[in-house]
Amino acid sequence: MPDVALIDLVPGEEPHGRAALLLVESLMHGLIERSVITPRDALNIAVAACEIDLVVGEHNGETTENRSTSQQLLDKIVMSLRSEI
């Protein structure tokens, strides 16, 4: 299994969110390994999640710090998936 980008999350991250992100990233890598989706498809999904996160954060009036943290987490997934291409 490829390295999971989120292993080095900041200690103290919310455990449910961390588990969800690890599960999703692992699932995406697993689907790539089984040729269910292409690496490019997975990357496009992750990039779309980044874009949606920005829109939702702005709509909800989240602080820049909160949006920055979620973007950093999603960026780690994007970088991990780029390594598959």
Image (tube, grey):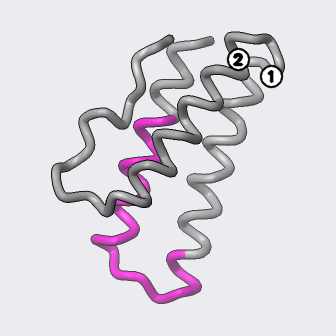
Can you tell which quarter of the image residue 46 is in?
A: top right
The magenta-colored residue range is 57-77
Say which amino acid is labelled 2. Answer: Ile
Q: Is residue 79 above or below residue 76?
A: above
Residue 44: x percent and y percent? Answer: 71, 36
Residue 77: x percent and y percent? Answer: 48, 36
Marks 2 and 1, how far apart in space?
5 Å
User: SS of the residue at dot 2?
Assistant: helix
At 26% from the left edge and 44% from the top edge, which residue is drawn?
A: 9
Q: Main secondary structure of the magenta part?
A: helix
- Binning the other alpha carbons within 10 Å of mark 2 as few (below 14), some (14 to 19) or many (20 upward) gives some
> Label 2: which residue?
32
Q: Which residue sits furthest right?
A: 36
> Label 1: which residue?
37
Can you tell which quarter of the image residue 67 is in?
A: bottom left
Q: Earlier in the sequence, mark 2 or mark 1?
A: 2
The answer to whether marks 2 and 1 mark residues whose Cβ atoms lie closer than 8 Å is yes
Say which amino acid is labelled 1. Answer: Ile
Magenta stretch: includes residue 1? no
- Binning the other alpha carbons within 10 Å of mark 1 as few (below 14), some (14 to 19) or many (20 upward) gives some
The C terminus, quarter of image: top right
At 56% from the left edge and 64% from the top edge, which residue is drawn?
A: 53
Number of numbered discs on residues: 2
Q: Is residue 31 above or below residue 46?
A: above
User: SS of the residue at dot 1?
Assistant: loop
Q: Which residue sits furthest bottom?
A: 61
Front-lying residue, 78 or 30: 30
At 77% from the left edge and 28% from the top edge, which residue is drawn?
A: 41
Q: Label for residue 54?
A: none
Q: Is residue 33 above or below residue 52?
A: above
Front-lying residue, 52 or 17: 17
Magenta stretch: includes residue 76? yes
